[in-house]
Image (cartoon, rainbow, N blue to C red):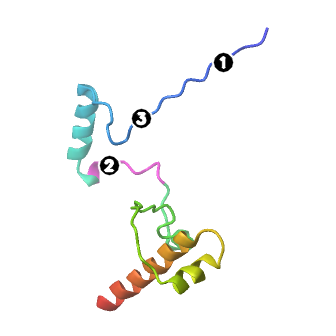
Amino acid sequence: MSKQTKTIKYSIDAGNPPELTADQQAELDALAAMPDEEIDYSDIPKTTDDDWKVAEVGKFYKPIKKQVTVRIDADVLAWLKSGGSGYQTRLNRELREAMKRALESAA
């Protein structure tokens, strides 16, 4: 006789989470009121500068995209499209780099 398992999937709308129970809210309130000195970090390994040398800044950062209409010179659009599919991503990357340079020079 084979054992059958039934998979149950749940989904949650992050923008509209379920209400917390009184016990859950009390636990969160207690944690928020706890001073940093009372937090037990003994089960977390210490990190060193060497651990962070391979870290990638912004690797999991996904900015919110907004659909817009932009008028671009035909030759610029042709150049972007000449690199194959993904021209909108390349355009966004070029604009982001220009934004970073402008922000760095303004600082």
Question: Element type at marker 1?
Answer: loop
Earlier in the chain: of badge 2 and badge 3, it is: 3
Question: Could you tell me which quadrant the N terminus lies in?
Answer: top right
Q: Nearer the viewer, residue 107 or 86?
A: 86
The residue drawn where x is 54% and y is 68% is 51
Tell me if label 3 and label 1 are in contact, CB under 8 Å: no
Residue bearing mark 2: 39
Tell me if label 2 and label 3 are in contact, CB under 8 Å: no
- Is residue 39 in the magenta section? yes
Residue placed farthest to the bottom in the image? 105
Q: Residues within 10 Å of mark 2 (few under 14, many from 20)?
A: few
Front label number (3 vs 1): 3
Residue bearing mark 3: 12
Earlier in the chain: of badge 1 and badge 2, it is: 1
Front label number (2 vs 3): 3
Lateral position of residue 17 relative to residue 12, left or right: left
Front label number (1 vs 2): 1
The residue drawn where x is 50% and y is 69% is 48
Residue placed farthest to the top in the image? 1
**Mark 2: amino acid:** Ile
Earlier in the chain: of badge 3 and badge 1, it is: 1
Count how many numbered circles sit on residues in the image.
3
**Mark 3: amino acid:** Ile
**Mark 1: amino acid:** Thr
Give the extent of the magenta segment: 37-44
Residue bearing mark 1: 5
Cα distance between the residues tagged 3 and 1:
23 Å
Can you say whether 2 is above or below 96 in the image? above
Question: Could you tell me which quadrant the C terminus lies in?
Answer: bottom left
Q: Main secondary structure of the magenta part?
A: loop
